[in-house]
Image (cartoon, rainbow, N blue to C red):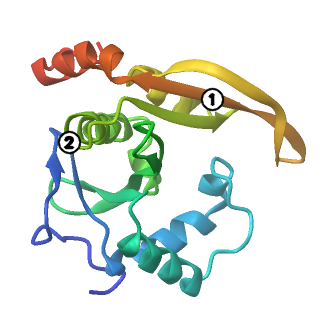
Amino acid sequence: MSENSNNLSDTPEFSRGKKVILRPLLRADLPKMIRWINDPDIRQYILAFWPTMEKNEEEWFDRLANGKTDAVFAITLLDGTIIGTIGLHKICWYDRTATTGSFIGEKQYWSKGYGSEAKMLLLHYAFHTLNLRKICSSVIEYNKRSYGCLRKCGYVDEGRQKRQHFKKGRYWDEVYLAVFRKDWEPLWRKFQRGGWGK
């Protein structure tokens, strides 16, 4: 498949919501991911700062297939069009914890609820399938959209590292958040009933 393949509806479907599907990441997705990560509008919100090349992404993709501490998915529309990625990282099977990371790479879908629905589907997998108990995340302090998404999905602030990251010519705090399964369960029930986020 080429980078221009928009409809991948014949690929495996892992989890389906009302707006998005989570499916396994494919090697065919890598060209779009390279474009997204190198886009300055997106890169300002993630920790990448070096140019990302094809070889970098291919090596990362190959490591994912052999690891047991990361689970990464493509976020697609219901017609199969990939719009971003989301994953569980640093899964600790002893402590039953992990961290999440995600981004919507197709900017026309920002601030429309696609990312937060994908996060809820990922949390359902983390808590109900992997039997994790606490999921962590962090954002650069000016990333209000990502912060709002996490709060909507039940995360609460746990602290911050002062002036941790150099972006936009200055240093910014990194804000740490987390959600426990027991606190998230009522939110999931509302999500299933369709009253979530209102």
Q: Secondary structure at mark 1?
A: strand
For the view shown, which residue lies furthest in the front direction? 94
Q: Position of residue 181 (x, y in %)?
A: 33, 23
Instruction: Give percent across and percent down for residue 17.
Output: 16, 40
Residue 127 higher or lower than 77, as above or below: above
Front in this rendered view, residue 69 or 137: 69
In this orientation, which residue lies closer to the viewer: 175 or 178? 178
Chain-order first, disc 2 or disc 1: 2
**Image quadrant in which you'd find residue 69:** bottom left
Residue hosting label 1: 176
Q: Nearer the viewer, mark 2 or mark 1?
A: 2
Residue 38 lies, in percent from the top left, at: 62, 68
Q: CA distance from mark 2 to mark 1?
A: 24 Å
Q: What amino acid is at disc 2?
A: Thr
Q: Position of residue 19 (x, y in %)?
A: 20, 42
Check disc 2 and report the residue beneath it: 129
Q: Residue at x 16, y 17 (%)?
A: 189
Left or right: residue 197 versus residue 161 is: left
Q: Residue at x 63, y 51 (%)?
A: 46
From the image, which quarter does the C terminus lie in? top left
